[in-house]
Amino acid sequence: MNLPDDYRKIDDEVAVSGQITPEQVADIKAAGYKSIICNRPDGESADQPNFELIEAAANEAGLAIRYIPVTKMGMTPENIEDTRTALDDLQRPIYAYCRSGARSTNLYGIAKG
């Protein structure tokens, strides 16, 4: 399976990692994940695939996906509320990603708490 090297499970419901590629979406599904949350804004790095490419791969794989970007300015109340809504709405387990997994981890912890 081709998951990112920094992939880690937070608990039985959520795993996080740094940036994923469209090609890794099928492996995320094969690993048992039902949904994806993107916490990385487009254009943060020149080499990252845009959300639209990840979204298209997720749709093709039959995975639900949400875009909840957290900018370098930090997480907002809207990010937290959108994450709570996503946690309520999306099938689990959920795979969340950003640049390193840190924003996804922190946002999940706050939204769940």
Image: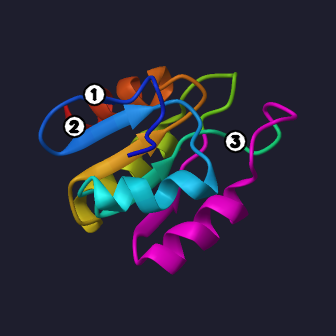
The mark nearer the N terminus, 3 or 1, is 3
Report the residue marked by disc 3. 41
Q: Is residue 74 above or below residue 40?
A: above
Give, as a three-letter code, the residue at label 3. Pro
Q: Nearer the viewer, residue 64 or 25?
A: 25
> What is the three-letter code of the residue carrying label 2?
Lys
Q: Nearer the viewer, residue 81 or 29?
A: 29
Quarter of the image where one finds residue 45: top right
* Region of the chain picked out in magenta, as a range: 44-69
Name the colouring of the figure.
rainbow
State yes or no: residue 45 in magenta. Answer: yes
Mark 3 neighbour density, 10 Å: few (under 14) some (14–19) many (20 or more): some
**Left or right placement of residue 83 versus residue 22 in this view:** left
Instruction: Give the mark nearer the N terminus: 2 vs 3.
Output: 3
Between label 2 and label 3, give the one nearer the viewer: 3
User: Dot 3 lies on which element?
Assistant: loop
Residue for point 36% across, 47% down? 95
Mark-to-mark CA distance, 3 and 1 = 19 Å
Secondary element at image label 1: helix
Circle 2 sits on which residue? 112
Q: Which residue is located at x 49 percent, y 42 percent?
A: 79
- Give the image location of residue 47, x and y in percent: 82, 36
Residue 109 disc label: 1
